[in-house]
Image (cartoon, rainbow, N blue to C red):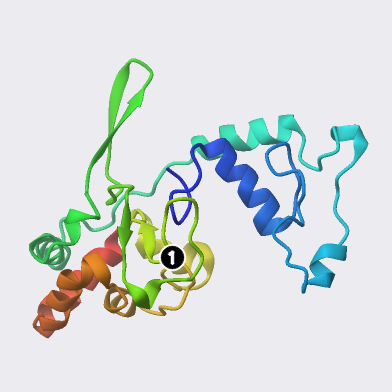
Amino acid sequence: RFGWKAGQPSLAQQNASALAGDIGIGNAYYPDPQGDCTEAQRPCIEAPNGNTAAQGGHEASEQMLAVLEQYTARLRAPDQRNAQAPLVRQGYAVFNRIGCQRCHTEYQVSEVGSGAQTLRPFTDLLLHDMGAGLADDRPEFDASASEWRTPPLWGLGLSQTVNGNSYYLHDGRARTLLEALLWHGGEASASRNRVISLPTAEREALIHFLESL
């Protein structure tokens, strides 16, 4: 399940959607890179694109899609840092006690060939109603405007290193992890309220744990 609302059924289609929707590269899945432009967005509609007859009419060839899928399928999630540090362990205990683990499930098992691989992404990969505060008025397939796929937390603490910023949630509205927690509503309201009620030391430990992921 890929995408903010679990709308893409495969890695190949998620990559193709990102090529077209994020950077305007047409491909076999999404042949019109201007497909998301509205009638009011004339510069978007009239922008040049790289579709050519030589590549079957698409800027991204089938080979490009295949290579991109191979690459993204083999990306490795970063390891947790300082997992045994006392403050991290305390934050981990708080994380579980206040109910975060119900949606941010620590372990998943993925079938790889004839065996199983245990992953630690901190997500159940399911849709949850996060309340009106996070609704974007853009339902996607069967996902409502306020429903979002639980995002994995692995790599969360490396946001600044990798992206050059620490913007959180689907639209980057939260500038700190605590702010992101406080935006949780809907099914996560009870856990959010427990965060608010935490003693300062426990709240800081929780943030320290999240930053270690």
Q: Nearer the viewer, residue 13 or 203?
A: 13
Q: Nearer the viewer, residue 178 or 32?
A: 32
Instruction: Identify the residue at horizontal 15%, vertical 61% (top origin).
Output: 92
Instruction: Identify the residue at horizontal 40%, vertical 78% (top origin).
Output: 174
The quadrant of the picture occupied by the N terminus is top left
Return the x and y of residue 167 as percentages of the image width and height.
46, 73
Instruction: State the image quarter where residue 210 is shown.
Output: bottom left
Q: Nearer the viewer, residue 148 or 208?
A: 148
**Image vertical order of residue 189 relative to residue 112, above or below:** below
Label 1 packing within 10 angstroms: few (<14), some (14-19), many (20+) = some
Q: Is residue 131 left or right of residue 193?
A: right
Instruction: State the image quarter where residue 176 is shown.
Output: bottom left
- The amino acid sitting under disc 1 is Ala
User: How many circles with numbers are drawn on the protein?
Assistant: 1
Residue located beneath label 1 in the image:
145
Return the x and y of residue 184 as percentages of the image width and height.
29, 72
Instruction: Identify the residue at horizontal 16%, vertical 82% (top origin).
Output: 196
User: Helix, strand, or loop for circle 1?
Assistant: loop
The quadrant of the picture occupied by the C terminus is bottom left
Q: Residue furthest right?
A: 53
Return the x and y of residue 29 as percentages of the image width and height.
68, 39
Return the x and y of residue 7 as percentages of the image width and height.
48, 48
Q: Is residue 119 left or right of residue 84?
A: right
Instruction: Identify the residue at horizontal 37%, vertical 61% (top origin).
Output: 147
